[in-house]
Image: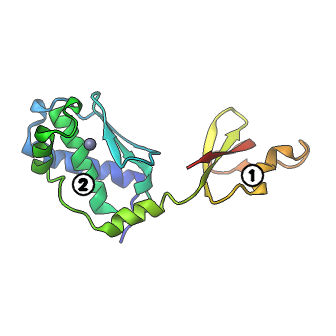
């Protein structure tokens, strides 16, 4: 099955949003949908804010957990429709059901998302212009990154071709 990309999350969000709006007109929603963000979240699949922002965990990216993604979007849109202050009360659950966000998803999808989170550390590159870049996950603190800043300045520094910048140092962030 096709793997999920960030763009596809955004596209699916707008498709699902249109379907939910047929169920309950947007004019009756507590919060209007303003923006969809794909962010690094390990403990949650998604979240919705009273300012109309829906955030989806980047752990979906690279998996084929399409049903879980759709369920999460429908769940978050229900939060926008009834108001985030309603939390998971009966009004919310009723709305979630109308948005068809309570359908069960295969356990295999849950496992695929969980295995996407298997790396112990995330390697963050600190770049010469003061910005950072997520290099990816690693299982242990390898010398390749941990001893990088100790090498003499005259030695060739890593060049990150994806952003065209030089790496000053690497940092391990626990996942
Ligand atoms: Zn919720």
Q: Residue 5: image x %, image y %? A: 41, 56
Q: Is residue 3 visible?
A: no
Q: Residue furthest bottom?
A: 1
Of residues 8 and 172, the one nearer the viewer is 172
Rendering quadrant holding ligand 1: top left
Q: CA distance from mark 1 to mark 2?
A: 38 Å
Looking at the image, residue 156 sits to the left or right of residue 16; the answer is right
Query: Of marks 1 and 2, which one's residue comes earlier in the chain?
Result: 2
Q: Is residue 106 above or below residue 126?
A: below
Task: Report which quarter residue 154 is drawn in.
Answer: top right
Q: Residue 132: image x %, image y %? A: 63, 39
Instruction: Please name the residue that numbered disc 2 is placed on.
Output: 71
Q: Residue 61: image x %, image y %? A: 43, 56
User: Which quadrant: the N terminus?
Assistant: bottom left
Q: Residue at x 39, y 60 (%)?
A: 4
Looking at the image, residue 45 sits to the left or right of residue 88; the answer is right
Q: Residue at x 61, y 52 (%)?
A: 121
Q: Is residue 17 above or below residue 128?
A: below
Q: Residue at x 74, y 57 (%)?
A: 142
- The disc label shown at residue 145, or none: 1
Of residues 27 and 60, the one nearer the viewer is 60
Looking at the image, residue 76 sits to the left or right of residue 92; the answer is right
């Amino acid at each position: 099955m096709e793997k999920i990309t960030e763009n596809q999350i955004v596209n699916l969000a707008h498709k699902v949003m249109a379907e939910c709006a047929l169920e309950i007109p947007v004019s009756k929603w507590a919060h209007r949908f303003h923006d969809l963000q794909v962010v690094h979240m390990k403990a949650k699949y998604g979240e919705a804010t009273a300012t109309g922002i829906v955030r989806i965990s980047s752990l979906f990216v690279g998996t084929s957990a399409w049903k879980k993604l759709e369920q999460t979007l429908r769940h978050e849109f229900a939060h926008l429709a009834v108001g985030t202050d309603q939390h998971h009360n009966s009004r919310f659950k009723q709305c979630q059901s109308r948005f068809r966000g309570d359908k069960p998803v295969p356990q295999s999808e849950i496992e695929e998302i969980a295995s996407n989170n298997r790396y112990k550390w995330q390697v963050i590159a600190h770049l010469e212009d003061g910005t950072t870049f997520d290099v990816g996950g690693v299982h242990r603190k390898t010398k390749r990154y941990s001893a990088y800043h100790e090498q003499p300045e005259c030695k060739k520094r890593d060049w990150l071709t994806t952003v065209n910048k030089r790496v000053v140092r690497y940092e391990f962030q626990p996942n």
